Image (cartoon, rainbow, N blue to C red):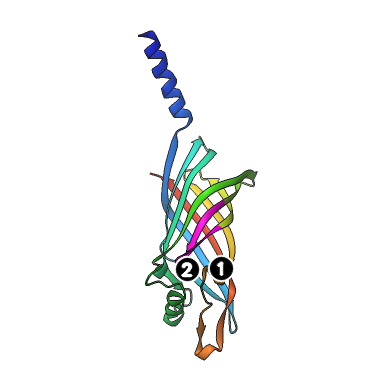
Amino acid sequence: MKRLTTLFIILIIVSRADAQTSYTIKTSDMNIRGTSTLHDWELKATMVNATCELNCEGHTIKDIKSFYLEIPTTSLKSMNGSKMMNDKVYSALKSETAKKITFKLEKIVSVDPGENGWDVRCIGSLSIAGVATSSVMMVHLRTEPDGSITFSGVKKLKMTDYNVQPPKAMLGTLTAGNEIEIEFEINLTKV
């Protein structure tokens, strides 16, 4: 009986030491910026879904077990309210068949203490317009006083890497540049 009690106590200690905490999205701010032959443009992701599993000790993140992010393609909206811009983006992103943009964490490369948190270099599968590529991301991670976690960063990429042809308008006189920049800040809270 004494051995059984000791084994039970050890199992409780081990399970608490490796306790995973699940998080889900609380708030998000994600913008996609680009250029064109006429003017710069910007889209806002009006709907973002994300989940994450972390091992934490207090406010210290010990390990990131998983991270998954999903953006419905038609939730991208032009910041100037242009329906024509929205329609061009949805067409370029093949929104009828590729209904969402996703990022799934594959591997953590490094975690370094940074100003007010950690700088995380990771590799994940980024899927845009139905094309998935392995992509390196630099993300700043911080814990908030309320126990939530905030991920922030900037990712530059080329549309053609995802077989997306830069949108054109006005009989081709307005053409979007190939390079875009995605800036994000996502706050996740415990489930």
Q: Amino acid at mark 2?
A: Lys
Question: Where in the figure is residue 173, as x and y percent of width and height?
Answer: 56, 89
Q: In this orientation, does residue 121 appear?
A: yes
Label ID, residue 44: 2
What residue is shown with label 1? 161
From the viewer's perspective, is the residue at label 1 or at label 2 nearer? 1
Is the residue 43 above or below the residue 29 in the image? below
The quarter holding residue 118 reads: top right
Is the residue 98 above or below the residue 22 in the image? below
Location of the N terminus (image quadrant) = top left
Residue at 46 percent across and 25 percent down: it is 14
Question: Where in the figure is residue 98, as x and y percent of width and height?
Answer: 40, 67
> Magenta segment range?
123-134
Circle 2 sits in a helix, a strand or a loop, which is it? strand
**Is 129 colored magenta in this rendering?**
yes
Question: Where in the figure is residue 97, as x and y percent of width and height?
Answer: 38, 70
Q: How many marks?
A: 2
Q: Residues within 10 Å of mark 2 (few under 14, many from 20)?
A: some
Dominant secondary structure of the residues highlighted in magenta in the image = strand
**Is 124 colored magenta in this rendering?**
yes
Q: Residue furthest bottom?
A: 171
